[in-house]
Amino acid sequence: MHVVMFTSEYPPEIAGGLGTSVGELVPELRRLGVESDVITLGAQTRSWEAEPGVRLHSLRPATQEPQPPGVPLGVAW
């Protein structure tokens, strides 16, 4: 099985509550034999294999303009 997760936070770039949760879920899925791709926001666009079976894709937002009030970062991807 292979899953793709979209999250606005993922360690080490951003590790709030959501980032911590996804950061703990991905290794557990891997332990169960599930390959994972995590797509998240970052300071630059890059991809790398964090560990065997776990690929991270960090996307820099296309615009540097501020988000509209009440819209979380990343919603306008």
Image (cartoon, grey):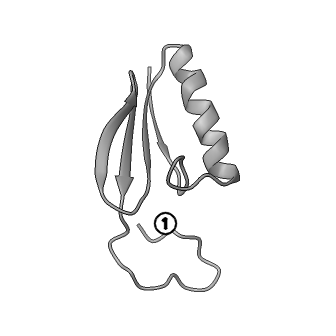
Residue 30 vs 75, above or below: the answer is above
- The residue under the point 59% across, 76% down is 71
Residue 20 is situated, as x and y percent measured from the top left of the image, at 65, 44
Q: Is residue 56 left or right of residue 32?
A: left
- The residue under the point 50% across, 54% down is 13
Residue 36 vs 65, above or below: the answer is above
- The residue under the point 32% across, 72% down is 62
**Quadrant assignment for the C terminus:** bottom left
Residue 33 is situated, as x and y percent measured from the top left of the image, at 49, 14
Tell me where residue 27 sits by quadrant. top right
Q: Is residue 40 left or right of residue 73?
A: left
75 and 38: which is toward the camera: 38
Name the residue furthest front: 12
- Tally of numbered tags: 1
Residue 8 is situated, as x and y percent measured from the top left of the image, at 53, 57
Which residue type carries mark 1? Gly
36 and 49: which is toward the camera: 49
- The residue under the point 59% across, 71% down is 72
69 and 49: which is toward the camera: 49
Assess disc 1: are there few (<14), some (14-19) or many (≥20) residues with their C-alpha within 10 Å of its C-alpha. some
Q: Secondary structure at mark 1?
A: loop
Residue 52 is situated, as x and y percent measured from the top left of the image, at 38, 21
Q: Circle 1 is placed at which residue position?
A: 74
